[in-house]
Amino acid sequence: MARSQQFLRLIAVWVLALVFIYAAIVKIWRPDQFLQDILSYQLLDYQMAWFVAYGLPPLELLAGVSIFFEAWRRVAGGLIFLMMVAFTLALISAWMRGLDISCGCFGKSDAAADYPILLIRDISLACLALYLCLPSSSQR
Amino acid sequence: MVIASAVLGAVNWTINPNRPPFSPETLQEGEIDLVGLAALSNPLYLDARTLSEFEEAHIPGAMLLNEDDWDQRVLALIERWEPGRVIVVYCSSLACQASHAVAERLKVEMGIDAVVVLKGGWEVWQEANNS
């Protein structure tokens, strides 16, 4: 049981780390395109979106790297969970307002958002992050 | 972690060449404002919004060209555009990206260099022309 849990946690760590590190690097390289993606959600004014365009990707990168380290895992998992909740709420808001946007999840994307698929993906990632926030069997 | 992110963000702002302006008024490469637009002689307007938005109202003389129906509508553009004539692409507002996407495709796929995006799009044009 403990072994299968360990394996599951390892999978969760790698999935979240790879997703967040990749997403961060793409956005860090093109803050101009990420800013346009944020603006397309029509939730933040320009200056606020500018700060998010520069501040969020490094936070994603640090969370993605930190999750590899046992000592930081719960904090990073919690941070990722909060980010995923925020992304999910933003997506739901855009969907309800009928906005035709590109997700912006991995930097600039030509494809318009496929809301149901994006929501399933975001909620799955949030669940993985929440799972990592729980104490492992060795910590109990 | 939050402080470290702020520091990394500041470093990125300093060294990354793809930095967006802090002020929404600042024009980026390939963009034009209403002042610049007034200086253009007989530009060809392309409306990158949706068909329903276009049908509701558009800049007089504008053609519809968005990514939903690209292949069919780009033929009409080829028939109407003549070399040297500047193409001005616009979409709904500062927040939309469709005009940038259309301008990029015209440059890359059609080899048309004289393409600019109207900053603020339909929103600023309408404000300027209704006041």
Image (cartoon, rainbow, N blue to C red):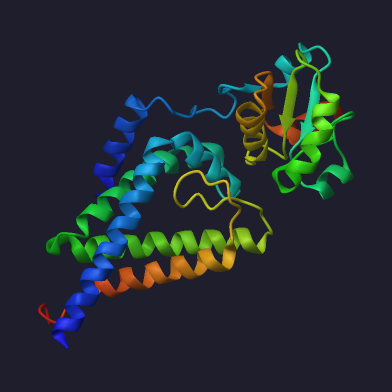
Image coordinates of residue B67 in percent, x first then y, are: 70, 44
Question: For the point 24% across and 49% down, which residue is it?
Answer: B1
Please determine whether, in this image, residue B109 is positioned above or below residue A133.
above
- Horizontal side of A43 relative to B32 (left or right) equals left
Give the residue furthest to the bottom.
A1
Please determine whether, in this image, residue B126 is positioned above or below residue A68.
above
Q: Nearer the viewer, residue B18 or B103?
A: B103
Q: Quadrant of residue B76?
A: top right
In the picture, which quadrant includes the C terminus of chain A? bottom left
Please determine whether, in this image, residue A93 is positioned above or below residue B40.
below
Q: How many labels does the image show?
A: 0
Question: For the point 60% across and 46% down, which residue is it?
Answer: A40
Task: Examine the rendering and report whether any part of residue B127 can be seen.
Answer: no
Question: For the point 49% across and 70% down, which residue is it?
Answer: A120
Image coordinates of residue B4 in percent, x first then y, are: 24, 43
Image coordinates of residue A93 in percent, x first then y, are: 59, 61
- Horizontal side of A33 relative to B121 (left or right) equals left
Q: Quadrant of residue B114?
A: top right
In the picture, which quadrant includes the N terminus of chain A? bottom left
Task: Examine the rendering and report whether any part of residue B69 can be seen.
Answer: yes
Question: For the point 80% across and 39% down, which residue is it?
Answer: B73
Q: Which of B23 and A135 is in front in this view?
A: A135
Give the residue furthest to the left.
A138
